[in-house]
Every structure is written in C-alpha cells, then in structure tokens.
Amino acid sequence: MTLAFLFFSFIGNFKIVNINTLRILNVRPEDQAKVVVMLSMGFFIGIFVATYQVTAESLFLNKLSGSLNKAFLISGGLGIGITLIFSFFQNRIRFAALAFFSMVLVLMGTTALNYFYHFGSATLRDDVLLLMYCLVGPMTALLLLCYWGLFSRLFDFKQSKRIIGWIDTGQLSAIIIANFLIPVTASLFPIPRTI
C-alpha cells in the first residue's frame, strides 16, 4: 500500500469530484485522486523547502559567511551520504516505510535544529547555523527522492508520459508563494538577538 493510499484510508471514503482543471490537463477520472495527492504533496514540500532554504541561507550568510567553503564541502558530503543511504534501503524495505521514515527524519531534524538554535548557547548556535545551512541540499534531495519515488509507484509509464510535464506544479507554485510571503510574515516572528 503506498503512502498516498494510506493517507486516504485514514480519511475514509475519499472521492475526487471531476475537477475541470484536471480534465483540461489530460487527467483521466481514475487518476484524479493520485494527481491530487502528488500536487498536494508537492505543494507542502515546496513550502517547506522554500522557507527552510531562505531561513537557513539568510541566517548563515548573516553570521557565518566566512565558513562558506567549509559549508559547501560538508553539504556535498552529507548529500552524497544521504542519497547513498536512501538508495541502499530503497530495495530492501517497502517504499512507504522508507518515505515515512524519511519524512519523520526531516521533521525531527528540523525540530531539533529549531530547538537548539533558540535555546542553545551562543557557541552551539553557530554550530547549529552551520549544520542548518549544510542540510539544505541533503533535506531537499531526500524530500525529492520521496516525491519522485512515490510518483514512479503511483503511475505507470503511459500515465507518467501524459502528466509528467506539469506534475510538480504544486511544488513550484508553493515555492513562488512562499518566497513572496516570507517578507510579509517576517515581522510576525522575532529574531533572537545575540550580544
């Protein structure tokens, strides 16, 4: 059972009504539920990636821009390592379990970074900023591996040829919206000042 259908099993009898937009985009009625899942998942991944990336990059460049070379090296190593680990487990455990674990790992990592940034010492805060910046690429790669892995399991080759050109529209629109809303919402979240 894929992650998308697991999600719908919790909701109950989920039926997608004929959405004119999906019909215009050449989505068949039997594929509408799967397309809505992919668009929704892409939207939320896009919101996360845009807000996390802007936050991590702006905080890092504001305080630790001298460590940029070190950060690039660490980020590259972490990205390769996470991709290798994901690839290793992809053929050994069910994809739904791997995707769920990956999403939980990203959530726990983000929560831990937030906690240690706000409640850690000044020295720890600098290390957290470095790690936060270094994890931008690896977290994005992990989320995209889950997204496209789910896509390849939900759609066969014929279906994917029909819809692959616009399936990540949810992610792209979320990134655009988030980048416009970040300056507007920035005043709602005070930045901790360090002495």
Image: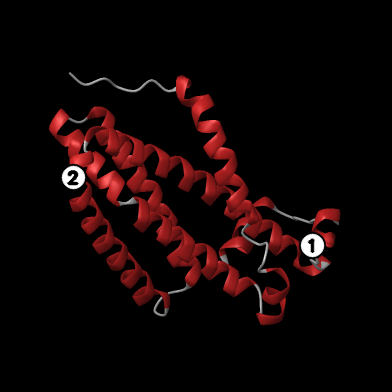
> Residue at point 55% right, 45% down?
175
Q: Which mark is residue 67?
A: 2
Badge 1 crowding class, 10 Å Cα cut-off, few under 14, some 14 to 19, many 20 or more, is: few
The percent coordinates of residue 132 (x first, y second) are 29, 44
Q: Which mark is residue 53?
A: none
Tell me the amino acid under the disc marked 2: Ser
Is residue 93 shown above or below 25?
A: below
Q: Can residue 181 be seen at all in this image of the molecule?
A: yes
- Point 23% across, 51% down: residue: 71
Tell me the SS state at disc 2: helix
**Amino acid type of the residue tagged 1 in the rendering:** Leu
- Judge whether 152 appears above or below 3 on screen: below
Q: Position of residue 104 (x, y in %)?
A: 41, 53
Q: Which residue is mark 1?
A: 25
- Compute the Cα span from label 1 to label 2: 46 Å
In terms of sequence position, does the residue under pointer 1 or pointer 2 come before the other?
1
Q: Residue furthest left?
A: 123
Can I make out residue 8 in this image? Answer: no
